[in-house]
């Protein structure tokens, strides 16, 4: 995968947002449990811009032990109180590494109970906490803002990402014009992960317009029993922000053949599913 091969290994190789790196590091190194206003760093920015990568690079450089709380982890009140809170009182590991809690996608949980528990964790924590979100102005995360050091990541310029794109194009022998690279950059809206994946999959067959496909057509490809994993992966990245929603909406109908009246009559799961709606 290009995203693995061309992933920056050190902070100096990170693309864009150079102005926030030093203040971020300074907050980390000067963190104090008694400073109520800056107990948590809130890192916000567009999807794919490199929030998680930047956090990992900084924490690796300064040898922190990362306690991760991701979107697919449990985030209910019981889990936060019984598992997460006790970890926040232990400043260091047995090996002497300082602990830090990193919470991903706090604006995507859709659970106000989670945010209230997270707020309590921030107030009581004896270790630094870093929270990440796509939308800094989402009302659901408002309770934690009074305790956060605000770090806003902005869309990198074309000049900043060009060096990486040029390196990939030359190394992988991808045939593409610079005007097409600029178009690709504009379509990405700052999503560097999208840029890299599109160079690997979208341009592989010499497509002139990587987003010419209709969202319904590409969703159909993802749900189809035909096609290879590569072709599905390629289709996914043509609209990676919308495809999860489209799959969620259409998956049940697709596997149960609800739209086929004859097949649906022979599918006992449909009645079970309908009774739970």
Image: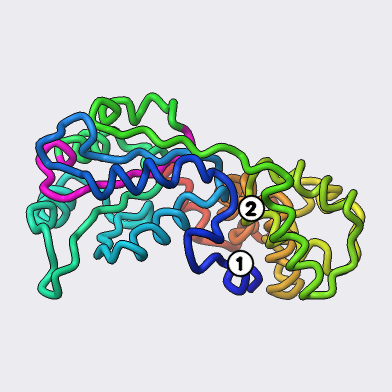
Seen in the image, is 97 located left or right of residue 240?
Answer: left
Q: Residue at x 17, y 44 (%)?
A: 77
Task: Give yes or no for residue 130 being in the magenta stretch.
Answer: yes
| Residue 152 placement (x, y as % from top left) | 46, 35
Q: Is residue 243 visible?
A: yes
Seen in the image, is 5 located left or right of residue 19?
Answer: right
The numbered disc on residue 50 is none
SS at badge 2: helix
| Residue 122 placement (x, y as % from top left) | 18, 39
* Residue carrying label 2: 192
Front-most of 5 and 119? 5
- In this picture the colour scheme is rainbow
| Residue 81 placement (x, y as % from top left) | 11, 48
| Disc on the earlier residue, 1 or 2 | 1
Instruction: Look at the picture and state if 97 lies above or below 273.
Output: below
Q: Residue at x 40, y 41 (%)?
A: 43
* Residue carrying label 1: 3
Seen in the image, is 114 located left or right of residue 179?
Answer: left
**Number of residues whose C-alpha sits closer than 10 Å to that of mark 1, classed few (under 14), some (14–19) or many (20 or more):** some
Cα–Cα span, label 1 and label 2: 9 Å
Number of marks in the rendered image? 2
Q: Residue at x 26, y 31 (%)?
A: 144
Task: Give yes or no for residue 143 being in the magenta stretch.
Answer: no
Q: Residue at x 57, y 50 (%)?
A: 48
| Residue 41 placement (x, y as % from top left) | 31, 40
Quadrant placement of the C terminus:
top left
Residue bounds of the magenta highlight = 121-135
Quadrant placement of the N terminus:
bottom right
SS at badge 1: helix
Q: Is residue 109 visible?
A: no
Instruction: Look at the picture and state if 216 lies above or below 93.
Output: above
Front-most of 73 and 28? 28
């Amino acid at each position: 995968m290009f995203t693995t091969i061309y992933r920056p290994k050190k902070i100096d190789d990170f693309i864009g947002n150079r102005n926030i790196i030093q203040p971020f590091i300074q907050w980390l190194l000067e963190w104090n449990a008694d400073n109520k206003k800056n107990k948590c760093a809130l890192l916000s920015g567009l999807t794919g811009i490199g929030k998680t990568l930047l956090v990992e690079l900084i924490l690796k450089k300064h040898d922190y032990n990362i306690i991760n709380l991701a979107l697919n982890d449990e985030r209910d009140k019981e889990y936060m109180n019984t598992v997460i809170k006790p970890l926040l009182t232990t400043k260091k590991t047995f090996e002497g590494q300082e602990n830090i809690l990193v919470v991903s996608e706090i604006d995507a949980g859709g659970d106000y109970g989670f945010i209230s528990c997270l707020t309590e964790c921030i107030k009581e924590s004896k270790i630094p906490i870093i929270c990440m979100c796509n939308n800094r102005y989402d009302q659901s995360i408002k309770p934690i803002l009074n305790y956060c050091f605000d770090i806003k990541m902005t869309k990198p310029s074309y000049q900043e990402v060009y060096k990486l794109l040029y390196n990939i194009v030359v190394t992988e022998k991808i045939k593409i014009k610079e005007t097409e690279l600029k178009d690709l950059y504009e379509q990405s809206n700052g999503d560097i992960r999208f840029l890299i994946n599109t160079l690997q999959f979208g341009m592989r067959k010499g497509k002139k317009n990587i987003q010419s496909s209709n969202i319904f057509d590409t969703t159909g490809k993802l749900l189809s029993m035909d096609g290879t994993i590569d072709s599905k992966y390629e289709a996914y990245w043509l609209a990676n922000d919308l495809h999860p929603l489209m799959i969620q909406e259409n998956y049940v109908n697709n596997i149960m053949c609800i739209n086929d009246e004859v097949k649906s009559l022979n599918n006992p799961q449909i009645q079970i599913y309908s009774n739970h709606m």
